[in-house]
Image (spheres, helix red, strand yellow):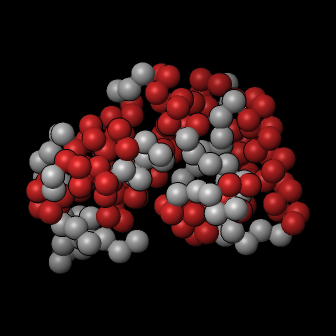
Amino acid sequence: MNASLTLADVNALPLPEFVQRFGGVLEHSPRYAERVGRERPFTRVEELAAAFTAAVLSDTPEQQLALIRAHPDLAGKAALAGEVTAESASEQASAGLDRLTPEEYAEFHRVNGAYHAKFDMPYIVCVRENTKGSILSGARTRLDNTPEAERETALREIGKIARLRVLDLVRQDAGGTPA
């Protein structure tokens, strides 16, 4: 994504526009953008990104689970049909999940099914920090987790995703550090 906003721009946005621009940071959950927008001004982009994670972690367990369940399966039917958010589609493509062989697709389908059967939620991983091989390997490993540990892991991964999405939206300063 092409970051077009400076931190000063972000801090000056009217709340509805902030929600519109940052509503996709957390999958299908613009309520978090509204919470974060009310916390402005921010002095660093990392502070803005951390506010999204803090908003999720301070939410109820039910709302956290709803956020987790709002994420699509990796290489799932929704992704193949183009029914995921632009952010998710781009991220899945970055790891090659849009170019799987039939065998790889079948393995993702199998792992996703096992994951849903055990945890009743999709497997969440920050795909931009992984390859399709490490994503599959991680899913297999995480199937050994307890439901509680897996929920905590999913929330940590969502925090990583949110951070990268915020960094995509807010322009870096001339020195290369977040504005």
Quarter occupied by residue 121: top right
Quarter occupied by residue 50: top left
The residue depicted at 74 percent of the width and 37 percent of the height is 115
Return the x and y of residue 119 as percentages of the image width and height: 69, 29
Return the x and y of residue 172 as percentages of the image width and height: 24, 70
Q: Which part of the image, by quadrant, shows the C terminus?
A: bottom left
Q: Is residue 77 visible?
A: yes
Picture layout, residue 133 above or below residue 94: above
Q: Is residue 85 left or right of residue 145?
A: left
Picture layout, residue 158 above or below residue 59: below
Between 104 and 15, the residue placed more toward the observer is 15
Q: Please tell me how many numbered marks the rendered image carries.
A: 0
Q: Is residue 42 visible?
A: no
Q: Is residue 159 left or right of residue 104?
A: left
Picture layout, residue 172 above or below residue 132: below
Return the x and y of residue 9 as percentages of the image width and height: 15, 63
Please identify the residue farthest to the bottom as the structure is shown: 174
Q: Which part of the image, by quadrant, shows the N terminus?
A: bottom left
The residue depicted at 31 percent of the width and 44 percent of the height is 33
The residue depicted at 43 percent of the width and 42 percent of the height is 29
Between 148 and 59, the residue placed more toward the observer is 59
Q: Is residue 56 left or right of residue 111?
A: left
Return the x and y of residue 149 as percentages of the image width and height: 59, 28
The residue depicted at 17 percent of the width and 39 percent of the height is 39
